[in-house]
Amino acid sequence: MLTVESLKKRIKNKEMSPIYLIWGTELYLAEDAIQTITSLLSPDEKDFNLSVHNLDEISVQEVIEDAETMPFLGDRRVVVMKNAAFLTAVKEKTKIEHDYKVFEHYIQNPADYTILIIAVPYEKLDERKKIVKQLKTQAEVIQVSQLSNDTAEKWLQKEAVNLGVSIDGEAIRLLLSRLGTHMAVLAKEMEKMALFVGENGVITKETVDSLVARTLEDDVFGLVDHVVHKKTEQALRSFYDLMKQNQEPIQIHALITRQFRMINGVKELQKKGYGEKQIASSLKLHPYAVKLASKHANRFHEEFLRNCLNEFAETDYKLKTGQMDKTLLLEMEIVKLSQGS
């Protein structure tokens, strides 16, 4: 199985295969791999010898017919087959009739003048299918899964170098906690921040905080941070700001509850001797979120946290049944939380 980086090295050395299978949910990497392979064609050759087909709109046998067409004014063709859902267990939505026997025959006898790229933007291939087994033996396989946090951190550092800037660790962790590991989104934000700091500049935590849009969850986290530090007035001000943005009180309360569940979960695992990386893995959280939750967890007694979670359930019921004014309910909850311990 190839990585996108190893693919680039092979293509640079003009080492190519007649069939490439690119599968996985990280579309940024998938598109990078496709662009790498199609770079074998010059701009003029692409006009005549590059075809991109979507199997939601065209039959697989028509794609194969295109792959078997001789190149025009060039030595090779590149044919891209996108959304090949038939290689997964996902039920196909299209009503187009596909003749998969034509496809099976082609992968056993591919045209020597064509590079066929098969893109499968799904998490898993259906390994039970005979056609998948055949394809994996005949094609170069490139998996493009979403990055792990560790891999994403390394990628961001490399991307910063490519953009002529640097990025510090705190900035990376805040960026990932705010945006996740979706590379297309990260790449766009990195480009924006690199332009802001200028050549040889440094992207800091403050840069991320000022340029990358905050989510509702970020704002609620700030509210909870005020609560944890017993800053009642600031916590209420954060809540009123959210209300001015027309945020729904039930959703705000759900996120406050989620934050306290996270704090409680971190505290319980700390008690068992878990380190931050182990906690992040067990709770499926970003390490940066665990680091912040760990600081909060140290400020609360276990019994207080358990009582909070019970009271959150009662508040949720009252919010949803309209037993009391929603704004007043949350004001009372915020005051009580910020005065507790």
Image: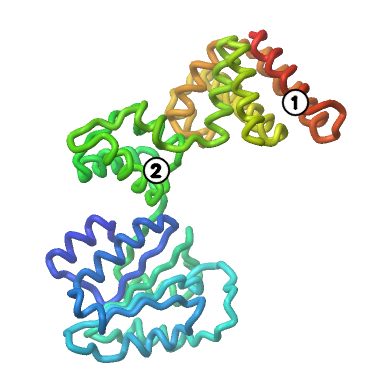
Quarter the N terminus occupies = bottom left
The chosen color scheme is rainbow
- Helix, strand or loop status at disc 1: helix
Amino acid type for the residue under numbered disc 2 = Ser
Badge 2 vs badge 1, beta-carbon distance below 8 Å: no
Residue at the limit of the structure toward the right, as seen here: 323
**Classed neighbour count for the residue bearing mark 1: other residues with Cα under 10 Å, few (<14), some (14–19), many (≥20):** some
Classify mark 2: helix, strand or loop. Answer: loop
Task: Please give left or right for residue 113 compared with residue 104 in the image.
Answer: left
Instruction: Judge depth for marks 2 and 1 and give the one in front.
Output: 1
3D distance between C-alphas at marks 2 and 1: 39 Å
Q: Quadrant of residue 106?
A: bottom left
Relative to residue 187, is residue 19 depicted above or below? below
Q: Residue at x 66, y 36 (%)?
A: 246
Mark with earlier residue (2, 1)? 2
The residue depicted at 22 percent of the width and 37 percent of the height is 198
Q: Residue 118: x and y, percent?
A: 38, 72
Left or right: where does residue 110 sit relative to residue 102? left
Q: Which residue is label 1 attached to?
A: 327
Q: Camera-side residue: 1 or 237?
A: 237
Q: Is residue 77 left or right of residue 125?
A: left
Mark 2 burial class by Cα count in 10 Å: few <14, some 14-19, many 20+? few
Residue located beneath label 2 in the image: 148
* Residue 294 image point, x, y percent: 50, 19
